[in-house]
Structures are given as structure tokens and as C-alpha cells.
Image (tube, rainbow, N blue to C red):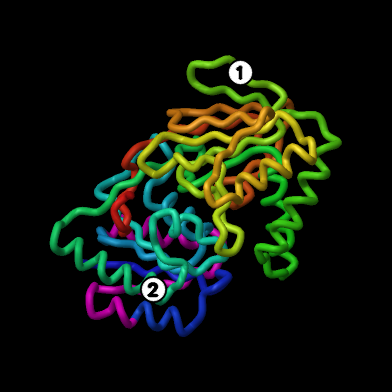
């Protein structure tokens, strides 16, 4: 088995010790090539080369942004297909939230995750198959766990601006930015219209999340839920609001942080297991994919694509 280990040395929680442990553990089990990313988009290029070279597994030691780049490098533009087989993807968390890895059942602790990976590679040798998961076709690129338009995009843009200034983005700083952007949006008119299969369009939407798994994200170790029944094996989950009333949304956030999430509110549009979602805006609006700022978009369509990717992960629960 041939594998490429892609390391993002700038990811939030990667360390030299963890990188060395991971490489050492893998070298005796697979034919390993280690590559460090050194610029934005580099993981896309490495993944493309791995697919062309017939690599069996691409292992990522980095955060969710690196995962997204690798998946897009492996699969190319949605709807255009790929030449030849696509390597399976494995993740040893090295970012801040590590949503994708945790949603797959991978430990957020890099040492524990390394041991999981070794065991899972051994299981593959015995049974010869990878777990396959669904992804989200966003038109111009793939999302592995979430996308959003509106306040969600504003928050991600503000977080990236903090990173550009060299500031570490902790869960506390992310929450402060999110609260600031939410309060700022109270004074704005809603700009989004939501379209879902089998129902009338929903105008007057302030922001919309589209999910491919659960939870939506993590605040340190605490999961934040939007669509608890959405998984990599179902259709998409949709979570959108038609009010920015502060009290109503504080109550909603409380439910999202609950251990037994029952997420309901009068101003909430929430659906699970939908095949597609279309969001349009009255003017270009901030948008994000997998926690990376995409830019301003006037319309986006999201489609569920079942079994789009092989992953080195425990079976779905």
C-alpha cells in the first residue's frame, strides 16, 4: 500500500513531535511519502499528483481547511468526473475544531488518532474495503461537512481577517466574533431566499447553514448542533433563520449547545435528508465552505452526492 502524508505545519495544533510520531508509525506499514504544505492551495496540488500517481491513501495531518483542499484536489470540479481511481482519505487532526475528523469518529487527540489509523489500515488489509461517505456538491467546489451564506459567511470572513493579522483563533475568540456579527446583523434587512424540494420558497432569511454531517462544529470539546440527524450517509441538513431577534436567537443557541439537542423555534427553518438546497440573495453576500471564506455570492445550489469518497474511518454508527 502506497500513501502520501500531507502535513500542514501551520495548522493550529500540529507539533513536530506529533508529526514525527505519525510518520514513524506509518513507515513500517505503508510505502510513505511525506509532503509539507507551504502555501494556500498546495494541498490541492499534492492531492492531484497523488491521484495521478496511483496512490492508495492520502493521509492529512492538519485542520478542516487542509481536508477540504485535499478532497477538492482528489475529486476535481463537481460534475466533471476523475481519471482513474481516487485514493482514500485519512485524517489525523491538527487543526482547531477538526470537525470532519471528529464527525467520522476519529479522536481529536493526534496520538490516539494515529493508533486508530494504524488499526484501520490493518482492518483494510483484512477486508479490502474503505468506508464511503457522501459529500456536498456546491457547484464550483466540494464541501465535506458544511457551507453557509449570510451571517455565517461574515463570521468566517472576520475570523480569517484575524488570522491574517497573526492572531490565534481560539474557540473564545470565534464566539466573540460570532456574537459581534450576529448583533450587527440585527440592524440589516434579510437578503436571502431559501428553496427546498417540495415546498414554496422561503424569503426573508438572514442566514442559512447547509450541513453534510453532525455536529455542525465544536466549541472546544463541546459539540454545537444544527441538524443532529444529518450524517455522511443521509442527504443534506438545512438550518436557516427568518429573525435576528436577540432573545429568540440566544434561546436557539442554548438548544444548539444542549447535550440532547431538540432544536426548534418559530423563526427557524430546519430540514434533514434533503437532496438539494438553493439559496439566492438580493445582492452578493458573504459565503463559506468548510469554514473557509469563499467570497461574495448571489446564488448557490448545494446537492447531496452519496458515497462520493472513500475514507479511513470507523464504520458509521
- Most extreme residue toward the front is 260
Residue 44 seen in the figure: no
Q: Secondary structure at mark 1?
A: loop
Relative side of 179 to 222, left or right? right
Residue that mark 1 sits on: 201
| Residue nearest the viewer, comparing 95 with 178 | 178
Residue 269: in magenta span: no
Image location of residue 117, percent across then percent down: 31, 68
The residue that appears at 40% across and 76% down in the rendered structure is: 111
- Looking at the rendered structure, the number of numbered marks drawn on it comes to 2
Query: Which structural element holds mark 2?
Result: helix
**Mark 1 and mark 2: span between their CA atoms?**
46 Å
Residue 20, quarter of picture: bottom left
Residue with the mark numbered 2: 112
Start and end of the magenta stretch? 24-53
For residue 43: magenta? Answer: yes
Q: Nearer the viewer, residue 21 or 271?
A: 271
| 84 left or right of 5 in image | left
Residue lying furthest right: 187
- 89 vs 200, left or right, is left
Q: Answer above or below: position of 282 versus 219.
A: above
Is residue 180 shown to the viewer in this render?
Answer: yes
Dot in front, 1 or 2 = 2
Locate the N terminus by quadrant: bottom left
| Rendering coords of residue 308 (x, y %) | 34, 42
**First reached walking from the N terminus: tag 1 or tag 2:** 2
Amino acid at each position: 500500500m502506497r500513501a502520501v502524508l500531507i502535513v500542514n505545519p501551520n495548522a493550529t495544533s500540529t507539533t513536530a513531535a506529533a508529526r514525527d510520531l505519525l510518520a514513524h508509525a506509518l513507515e513500517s506499514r505503508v510505502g510513505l511519502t511525506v509532503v509539507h504544505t507551504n502555501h494556500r492551495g498546495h494541498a490541492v496540488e499534492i492531492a492531484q499528483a497523488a491521484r495521478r500517481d496511483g496512490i492508495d491513501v492520502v493521509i492529512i495531518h492538519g485542520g478542516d481547511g487542509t481536508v477540504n483542499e485535499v478532497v477538492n484536489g482528489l475529486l476535481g470540479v463537481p460534475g466533471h468526473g476523475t481519471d482513474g481511481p481516487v485514493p482514500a482519505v485519512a485524517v489525523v487532526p491538527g487543526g482547531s475544531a477538526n470537525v470532519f475528523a471528529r464527525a467520522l469518529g476519529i479522536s481529536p487527540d493526534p496520538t490516539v488518532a494515529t493508533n486508530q489509523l494504524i488499526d484501520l489500515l490493518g482492518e483494510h488489509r483484512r477486508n479490502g474495503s474503505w468506508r464511503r461517505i457522501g459529500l456536498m456538491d456546491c457547484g464550483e467546489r466540494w464541501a465535506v461537512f458544511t457551507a453557509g451564506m449570510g451571517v455565517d459567511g461574515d463570521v468566517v470572513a472576520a475570523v480569517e481577517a484575524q488570522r491574517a493579522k497573526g492572531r490565534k483563533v481560539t474557540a473564545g475568540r470565534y464566539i466573540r466574533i460570532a456574537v459581534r456579527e450576529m448583533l450587527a446583523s440585527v440592524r440589516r434587512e434579510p437578503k436571502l431566499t431559501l428553496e427546498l424540494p417540495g415546498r414554496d420558497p422561503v424569503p426573508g432569511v438572514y442566514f442559512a447553514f447547509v450541513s453534510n454531517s453532525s455536529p455542525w462544529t465544536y466549541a472546544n470539546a463541546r459539540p454545537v448542533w444544527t441538524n443532529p440527524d444529518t450524517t455522511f450517509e443521509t442527504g443534506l441538513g438545512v438550518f436557516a433563520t427568518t429573525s435576528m431577534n436577540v432573545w429568540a436567537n440566544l434561546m436557539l443557541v442554548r438548544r444548539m449547545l444542549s447535550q440532547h439537542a431538540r432544536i426548534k423555534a418559530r423563526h427557524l427553518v430546519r430540514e434533514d435528508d434533503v437532496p438539494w438546497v438553493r439559496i439566492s440573495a438580493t445582492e452578493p453576500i458573504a459565503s463559506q465552505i468548510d469554514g473557509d471564506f469563499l467570497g461574495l455570492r448571489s446564488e448557490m445550489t448545494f446537492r447531496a452526492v452519496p458515497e462520493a469518497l472513500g475514507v479511513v474511518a470507523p464504520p458509521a454508527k
